[in-house]
Image: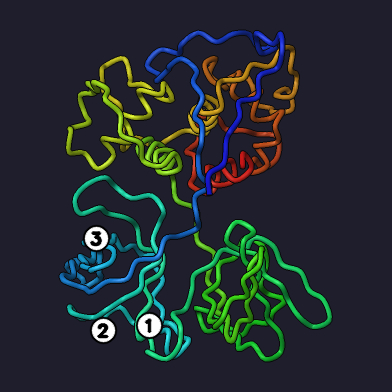
Amino acid sequence: MKLNLPALILAGALACSMGIPAAAAGQPVSAPTTVEDSAVLPASVLYYGRVENIVRQSDGAIRQLHLSSQRYGDYVMNISDETLWIDSGACAKSDPATLEEGESLYIFHSPVATMSMPPQSSAIAVVRNIPMDVGCAQYHKVEAVSAENGTVQITTDNGGLHILADDETGLSSYDGAEVTLDDIQAGDAVMAWYGAIAESYPAQTHASHLMLLPRQASKVLTRGELVAMLHTQAGNPTVNYAMQYTDVAQDHPYAEAIRWATSEQLVSGYDNGAFGPEDTLSREQLVTILWRAQGSPMLMDYPGLSEFSDVSQISSFAQPALCWAHQQGLLSWVEGDTFSPQSPATSAQADAMLAALH
């Protein structure tokens, strides 16, 4: 689904109350731009394929799966300690130690993938042992939960699907703890087993079983990862742009995403000519890049940032972006009165801001 991200331009607004920023020394800066026709990223993307090679660490832990598929092509899935392993037939957790080459899997992976050949992505859930006569367990992020007359309705898939559960729905948790329907809350993730889906909008189905998944710690975000997220959201456009960063080779996994983002003036490099794709993204950099993606709207005489006790620590280049984000209510993830502008940004914070912008 394509959605337009209009830039919010306030008439006559030329400067933030804290002043038009000058470029901070050593900080990546660029001119404003607008990104049109961006798509809402799904919580995951489904891949089905056959395991061709398993890459293990010295302790036996799986770190990569090389897969092939007639439908989806070759793919490399990166496995982490947070990757979930699901036995679909048993509605239970699976043991990755028993995985063998030649096995067929369903893998729910990150919507962000590299442009390399084969592409690489991070596996969220690996689903095994899928009976031929029933559907595969499906990974869903819970966006909202409501209850009426003993039936719980779970909203997921960007509002496009309602999963109904009642006293006939089997319940379990990934870690084996006992759960009830009351334990499923917005922000959780579940594996859901269901059959037919009613053709309506939102679509609707009844779950025969739900598995509550553990809430995972949010990953610290790098500059390259955020650019890749935005590139994917924009439809992976290819641009003809001479990119000359000293640390981004033409075959770098994020090369095309960085080339596109630079051409759109969403990002630029450091004074030393490097881009720093593996550098941790700071909170103020996250807000600034998303502000540029919205057209760099400027607010005049906006006092909202004064509620942050560390406002003096916000870099001058990020001040207009923070004014805009605060005024738009995009900083709901900030706890208390401290913004911590130089602290690492997380994937959850980026997801929250991107979701709010849609």
- At a point 17% along the width and 78% down the height, the residue shown is 101
The amino acid type found where label 2 is placed reads: Thr
**Residue 165 location (% of width, % of height):** 68, 81
Closer to the camera, 270 or 148? 148
Tell me the quadrant of the picture where the C terminus can be found: top right
- At a point 30% along the width and 78% down the height, the residue shown is 96
279 versus 106 height, above or below: above
Q: Residues within 10 Å of mark 3 (few under 14, many from 20)?
A: many
Distance in Å between CA atoms under marks 2 and 3: 21 Å
For label 2, the SS is: helix
Q: Which mark is residue 75?
A: 3
- At a point 45% along the width and 88% down the height, the residue shown is 134
Closer to the camera, 204 or 63? 204
The amino acid type found where label 1 is placed reads: Ser
Instruction: Between label 2 and label 3, give the one nearer the viewer.
Output: 3
Distance in Å between CA atoms under marks 2 and 1: 9 Å
Closer to the camera, 140 or 247? 140
**Residue 31 location (% of width, % of height):** 46, 15
**According to the image, label 1 marks what residue?**
94
Q: Residue 248 carries which label?
A: none
Q: How crowded is mark 1: few (under 14 residues within 10 Å), some or many (20 or more)?
A: some
CB atoms of marks 2 and 1 within 8 Å: yes
Q: Which mark is residue 98?
A: 2
129 versus 215 height, above or below: below
